[in-house]
Image: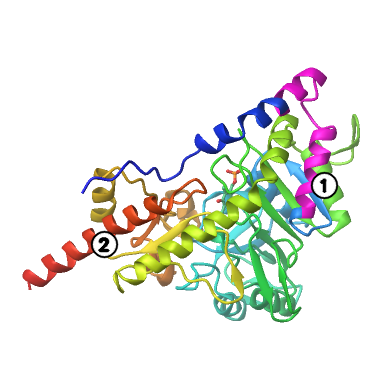
Amino acid sequence: MSVSKIPFLDLVTPHKEIEAELVEAFRKALHTAGFIGGPAVEGFEMEYAAYCDSKFCVGVANGTDALRFALMAAGIQAGDAVITVPNTFIATTEAISQAGARPYFVDIDERTYNMDAAKLRTFLETKCTGKPGNMVTNDLGLSVKAVLPVHLYGQMADMDAIMDVAHEFGLIVVEDACQAHGAEYFSRKQQKWLKPGSFGMAAAYSFYPGKNLGACGEAGAVTTNDKEIARKIRQIRDHGQAKKYYHDVEGYNGRLDAIQAAILTVKLKHLPEWTRRRQQLAKQYNAAFAEVGASVVVPFEPEWSRAVYHLYVVRVRNREALQAELSEQGIGTGIHYPVPLHQQKAYEYLGYATGDFPVTERVAPEIVSLPMFPQMTADNVNDVVAAVRQNVQALAASAHSSR
Ligand SMILES: *Cc1c(COP(=O)(O)O)cnc(C)c1O
């Protein structure tokens, strides 16, 4: 079989499609020498806050800064513990450590790959002691301040359940929405669809080029409904100054560049249509894989979720063989993520062992991300599914004959 080459992600075509608008945004910045702050940044912040149904948006230099500044604004500091999942990108835990705290992990739900609220509760009940708002870890006596759920692959974590536990134990919640621009969750408690940042104290976004809303460079933002948190983050991103050269605290150089803000404003207009396209492609993938059978586990989208499919992740037994075969046919794939964070060398010092997070460890060798980008065609999806089907059927046949 010969298929046209299908990249894992195409970042060239979408930029060609809106090249004139992007060049105009750049030209405007050049002609006004508006490179840092100013109307382009403020304009984007207003529009992105509206898109996220949030009161405030603070643009920052990247998603890692967004997470770190949100934690710092929430008062996270040295001697604190922050709970997250091992199945995420390392930026989640870098932000925790770099705010001075120590990351603790709880396992994920096997169907959604996101934080399992029941395991969060078990961790608090069995590995911590103290009163709500004053929980302390049993091993090191650290103050458990916050929980950092990740809305991985574009689908929100089960926020009603996570918020229940957080309220019960008096924890701050910061959401890692770096892969979940525009994702929605139906809150059974509030009886409405809500976006990231509507639950926790703040949500952190990345606009790294490959994200659903990507800059032409590095960028990020925090959204929040809390005016004081927004004020603190504005200060932290700009050397801790409330007014030029008057520094209330020591901060960072973590501002959103004005050219990127202008580019993001142009792209934000296209995001709803790009998101709809991702959702259509995911549906088409699901329908086509339904014919392939149980050997390919497709993404599970609960009825309370409207995922935005930053990634389309399936689970298979023969991941390495499948990737090699697809690569041979010119089809790109990715793994998000091959090594769980508790098994990374960087986190040896946390003292976790293999076996500590069985669900994460079970899925890590089996997950594979298939091509997913708004410019992908229906034929592309059919070609990918046909190639996957051929591979898993060949594997099943050889397993049968060698029995
Ligand atoms: C991309 C990403 C980040 C970090 O964003 P950067 O802009 O690359 O700093 C954090 N968390 C998750 C889950 C991400 O996917």
x, y percent for residue 242: 91, 39
Q: Which residue is mark 2?
A: 389
x, y percent for residue 213: 62, 46
Residue found at x 76% / y 25%: 35
User: What kind of residue is marked 2?
Assistant: Arg
> Could you classify mark 1 by the number of other residues whose Cα lies within 10 Å: few (under 14), some (14-19), or many (20 or more)?
some
Q: Is residue 396 visible?
A: yes
**Main SS of the magenta segment?**
helix
Tell me, yes or no, whether the highlighted magenta stretch contains residue 40. Answer: yes
Question: Compared to 32, does 122 lie above or below?
Answer: below
In the visual, does 153 lie left or right of 255?
left
Q: Which residue is mark 1?
A: 46
Residue found at x 75% / y 49%: 48
Question: Camera-side residue: 319 or 348?
Answer: 319
Mark 2 or mark 1, earlier in chain = 1
Task: Compute the Cα span from label 2 to label 1.
Answer: 46 Å
Residue found at x 70% / y 79%: 164
Assign the C terminus to one quadrant of the image. Answer: bottom left
Determine the secondary structure under disc 1: helix
Residue range corresponding to the magenta coloring: 25-50
x, y percent for residue 126: 57, 80
Q: Quadrant of residue 147?
A: bottom right
User: What kind of residue is marked 1?
Assistant: Met
Question: Compared to 146, does 116 lie above or below?
Answer: below
Question: Camera-side residue: 334 or 230?
Answer: 334
Q: Quadrant of residue 294?
A: bottom left
In the visual, does 88 lie left or right of 56?
left
Way the structure is coloured: rainbow
x, y percent for residue 19: 61, 30
Tell me, yes or no, whether the highlighted magenta stretch contains residue 325. Answer: no
Q: Is residue 309 visible?
A: no
